[in-house]
Amino acid sequence: MTLLEKPKNINNAVVLICLSLVVSLFKIALDYDFLLSLAPIQGTVITMAFTIAIMLFLAYKIWQGRNWSRIAFFVLFILGIYPAILLMPAEAERSMAVVLGSYIQALSQVAALVLLYLPVSNN
């Protein structure tokens, strides 16, 4: 599938997924002291790097037009949104910038999913 054949919604969805990842990096920087208090830094860094790598891999495969990656992104979103919502009040107590980042992440991922599942994107 060439860039000319790919629906514009797919490209926009991948950009939104990448935006979500960039926001997560800013959230990590803003909430660094709290993250250090949770676990040893090595484990935290490995977990976050693994998560970001998976999301980048899925974004790339979505961009390539692989349907399984779109489904995998949807499943991971469903598994992650409930805990993310539960964590938002605690994030708000620590920093409004962190909770704002969480909202931006969630909204960009929802928008990406909507774009990915529009009828024009199903080709």
Image (spheres, rainbow, N blue to C red):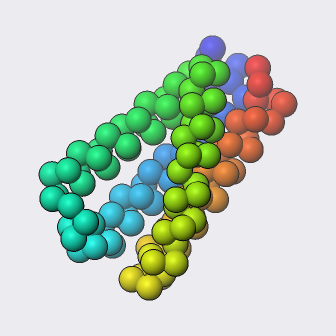
For this view, does 68 lie left or right of residue 18?
right
- Residue 79 in picture, x, y percent from top left: 56, 46
Indicate whether 37 appears above or below 94: above
- Residue 14 in picture, x, y percent from top left: 57, 39
Residue depicted at x 49% and y 31%: 58
Query: Quadrant of the rendered structure where residue 86 is?
Result: bottom right
For this view, does 13 lie left or right of residue 105?
right
Indicate whether 60 appears above or below 43: above
- Residue 38 in picture, x, y percent from top left: 25, 66
> Looking at the image, which is closer to me, 8 or 71?
71
Indicate whether 20 appears above or below 89: above
Answer yes or no: is residue 11 visible. no
Residue depicted at x 37% and y 64%: 26
Residue depicted at x 41% and y 82%: 95
Residue depicted at x 66% and y 34%: 10
Q: Quadrant of the N terminus?
A: top right
